[in-house]
Image (spheres, grey):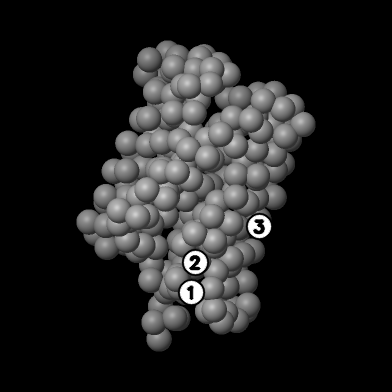
Amino acid sequence: MQYVPFIVGSAIECFGVFIVMFSLFRFRLNTRAFITVSIVAFMMSQLSYFTRLNPETSNLSTYIQFAMYVIVLWVLFRVPVFYSILMNFAGFAVLVVVQGITILVLGAINNISLETIKNNGMINAATQLLTFILMLSLARLILRFNWGFDFVPTSRRHEMEFKGTNVTLIAVIISAIVVLTVVIYVFRNEYKDFVIYASLVFLLTLPAFLYFSLRKDNEDAA
């Protein structure tokens, strides 16, 4: 992997995840938050690079990053762990779907093989930049049409009852992670199939996640 293209592409992709999360759950991206997210995005890109270099941690890179994202929201933005998990799942799901569609469309239109995208640092970074632009556009649509949710608190002292819709949301997340783990194992040597099936996992999971998130929003409002 080429260091500079990978770091640049990974950082802007990470920034896109935060933009989508903050838009969907109605967090303000002020100057302080912008600087914090930029620093975190750079650090996450480093983590992604070095975990992928080591064969022993390569397949675990996504899970390691997800855990770190959860910790970042909890520590730096004072989001309780449960809600941090929900926010990060939404961000990662959108990223995988948008990235997967982008890669497949580019391959179909420009006749660029998925292996070329994966192994060419500059092409991969360009693909990540396009993914970021699409996620930024999606975030803009969320804000424009007020599609976000209000149920995420910004205090770690928030008391939450682990029942009802909360349990359902966690069940949806766990189910998606389990299926994704199977996909990673089965298609670990088939990049094209992995991209297709990983995208499908989250594409099919997102509607259920958004439906129960909306239900939770209405329950909390009531």
**Counting residues from the N terminus, which is met first, the one under dot 1 or under dot 3?**
1
Q: Residues within 10 Å of mark 1 (few under 14, many from 20)?
A: few
Quadrant assignment for the C terminus: bottom left
Q: Are marks 2 and 1 in contact (CB under 8 Å)?
A: yes
Residue 138, percent from left and from top: 32, 47
Mark 3 secondary-structure assignment: helix
The answer to whether one can see residue 204 in this image is no
State the CA–CA distance, disc 2 to disc 1: 6 Å
* Residue assigned mark 2: 78
Q: Is residue 194 left or right of residue 149?
A: right
Looking at the image, residue 37 lies above or below residue 43: below
The answer to whether one can see residue 122 in this image is yes
Quadrant assignment for the N terminus: top right
Mark 1 secondary-structure assignment: loop
- The residue under the point 33% across, 38% down is 134
- The residue under the point 32% across, 36% down is 133
Q: Is residue 41 left or right of residue 19?
A: right
Q: Is residue 179 left or right of residue 151?
A: right
State the CA–CA distance, disc 1 to disc 3: 25 Å
- The residue under the point 27% across, 57% down is 143
* Residue assigned mark 1: 155
Q: Residues within 10 Å of mark 2 (few under 14, many from 20)?
A: some
Mark 2 secondary-structure assignment: loop
Looking at the image, residue 49 lies above or below residue 141: above
* Residue assigned mark 3: 174
- Type of residue at label 1? Ser
Residue 49 figure quarter: top right
